[in-house]
Amino acid sequence: QLQASGGGLVQAGGSLRLSCAASGRIFSTYVMGWFRQAPGKDREYVGAITWSGLSTHYADSVKGRFTISRDNAKNTLYLQMNKMKPEDAAVYYCAADPHDGLGFRFWGQGTQVTVSS
């Protein structure tokens, strides 16, 4: 089970940190990712992190501004968003990939992020 939180309203150029609480069985060995979906648009991949936390990958649209991290002791995934832009506004979702070839197949409820210009 995954639960994202931390969304809210932020001004352009500001920062926000999202959290995703996960059950231990899901979290500890899975690749974790963040996705987002803006109104009228397809869901977009934001980035992902390996189970160890040693490797991350980001979409070009957020590279250099967003940072994904995880605390396996707390079963929590984070998304630090800096230098935010109006186009970052979306519902953000966390997801888990058991690395079994089927991709991200465990999804949490989203958290709304609004960016004012």
Image (tube, rainbow, N blue to C red):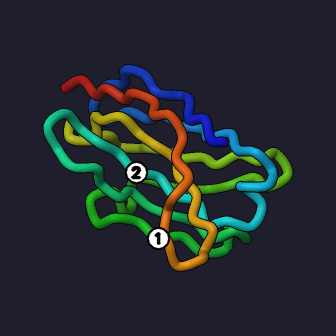
For label 1, count other residues whose C-alpha is less than 10 Å away and answer few (under 14), some (14-19) or many (20+): some
SS for tag 1?
A: strand
Q: Position of residue 53 (x, y in %)?
A: 68, 67
> Which of the pair 70/28 is nearer the observer?
28
Spatial separation of the CA atoms under disc 1 and disc 2: 12 Å
Residue at image position (64%, 49%) is: 77
Residue at image position (45%, 34%) is: 110
Q: Is residue 111 left or right of residue 108?
A: left
- Mark 1 and mark 2 lie on one chain; the one further toward the N terminus is 2
> Which of the pair 88/108 is nearer the observer?
108
Q: Is residue 75 left or right of residue 46?
A: right
When asked about the image quadrant of residue 25, the answer is: bottom right
For label 2, count other residues whose C-alpha is less than 10 Å away and answer few (under 14), some (14-19) or many (20+): some
Residue at image position (28%, 50%) is: 43
Q: Quadrant of the N terminus?
A: top right
Residue at image position (70%, 44%) is: 22
> Which of the pair 86/101 is nearer the observer?
101
- Whether 20 is drawn above or below 31: the answer is above
Q: Quadrant of the C terminus?
A: top left
- Whether 73 is drawn above or below 57: the answer is above
Q: Amino acid at mark 1?
A: His
Q: Position of residue 89 (x, y in %)?
A: 28, 34
SS for tag 2?
A: strand
Q: Position of residue 24 (x, y in %)?
A: 81, 50
On the image, numbered disc 2 is attached to which residue?
35
On the image, numbered disc 1 is attached to which residue?
57
Q: Is residue 59 left or right of residue 77?
A: left
In the displayed orientation, state which residue is furthest to the right: 73
- Whether 48 is drawn above or below 72: the answer is below
Q: Position of residue 27 (x, y in %)?
A: 72, 55
Q: Amino acid at mark 2?
A: Phe
In the displayed orientation, state which residue is furthest to the bottom: 101
